[in-house]
Image (cartoon, helix red, strand yellow):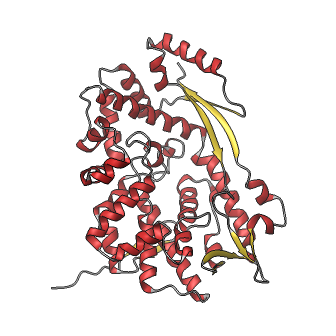
Amino acid sequence: MNKKNKKKIFNDPVYGFISIPSEFIYDLIEHPYMQRLRRIRQLGMSHLVYPGALHTRFHHVLGAMHLMNLAIQVIRRKGTEITAKEEEAVLAAILLHDIGHGPFSHALEHDIVNSVSHEDISSFFMQRLEEDFGDKLKLTRKIFTNNYKKPFLYQLVSSQLDMDRMDYLNRDSFYTGVSEGVIGSDRIIEMLDVHNGNLVLEEKGIYSIEKFITARRLMYWQVYLHKTVVSSEHLLINTLKRAKQLSIEGADLFASPALAFFLKNNITRTDFEDNPAVLETFSMLDDYDIMGAIKVWQFCDDKILANLSKRLINRKLFKIKISKEPFSEEEINTKKKELAQKMDISIEDTKYFIHSSRLVNNAYNQEKQTINLLMKNGEIIDLTEASDNLNISALTKPVEKFFICYPSI
């Protein structure tokens, strides 16, 4: 019997041909948990602003794996030992870093489940995958949780200079058409090195990093925090909140079995830890469950859920106002009273239609982690101290804006 050829290649629109480096990585990609990422959009509701933004989490993790492969070769060439087992484990870690995302990515982390982050769920999936793949994934989990003796491997997966960010900036700018997000990832990767076990960047890569951080800030304002994207995500969140409220009260809403489970139950981290069936049910949930249900909810008896669903299906989004100052309680309450009267709903139910919060754009967060430069004299300094202009120092300051969204009736 012929052995199946697992050395496949993908034709990626961003990087060209991407090869699968080992049979283990091939088997991991083939697993149903990974294939589920084909059914989850990378950018949530952004396609309502940028029609081309229909790429998936699956696209993204393959791209991140490709960049990780390049980074490993560069670091190895510069004299840092990375064993074959470590290489396979870190490639698996970047492939699995987003496996815990729910439908429409970040938008539903606090509604489908009760404050369980996608990182937590990714970790639960890795534990479960260990049952299928054994010891090979033990090292992956050590790297993923930053519990391995070579911290630079974790930093390649999760840091201010990780392969995740490198790919999503390249990929999201490609599919949205927002050219400001294009970064010189090849040059940045070529400048990577390791010093005392930590990831560093050679001094001559500083201008590429300035562009990288600037691109990140611009992509946040133009794509991830675009006001219409924010408006549509809150409409989606409120639609799910209403559906969950009705389900918990006993309403029989149309839903796939997986979605019905999460609508009828308040699932917490403890539920994932104590009951393996919860993770299996989550693994059956994707964007199709949500949109299939919302299409039907347009015609349900509850006028609030029907209204929200129709708006989402027909792109009749909430109006959104942005301000440098928080919106006053008085202004919010006035809008609630007007809306309650016009829609003939209670003040309490206006919470599904009016939402006020803030947007924070922090392109380079020094408090979380820093990007360290390896200077020609062997000294290691923080990126902000090395820049010969004010660009990066300015980019370290978070920019905050406030918003209110509400229906335009």
Residue found at x 33% / y 34%: 295
Q: Quadrant of residue 172?
A: bottom right
Residue 75 image offset from top left, x and y in percent: 58, 82
Residue 125 image offset from top left, x and y in percent: 34, 60
Left-right relation of 125 to 62: left
Q: Nearer the viewer, residue 271 or 14?
A: 271
Residue found at x 62% / y 87%: 78
Residue found at x 71% / y 45%: 399
Residue 384, placed above or below residue 405: below
Q: Nearer the viewer, residue 260 or 341?
A: 260
Residue found at x 27% / y 38%: 260
Position of the N terminus, as image quadrant, is: bottom left
Q: Residue furthest left?
A: 1
Residue 8, placed above or below residue 337: below
Can you see residue 12? no
Q: Quadrant of residue 311?
A: top left
Residue 99 image offset from top left, x and y in percent: 39, 59
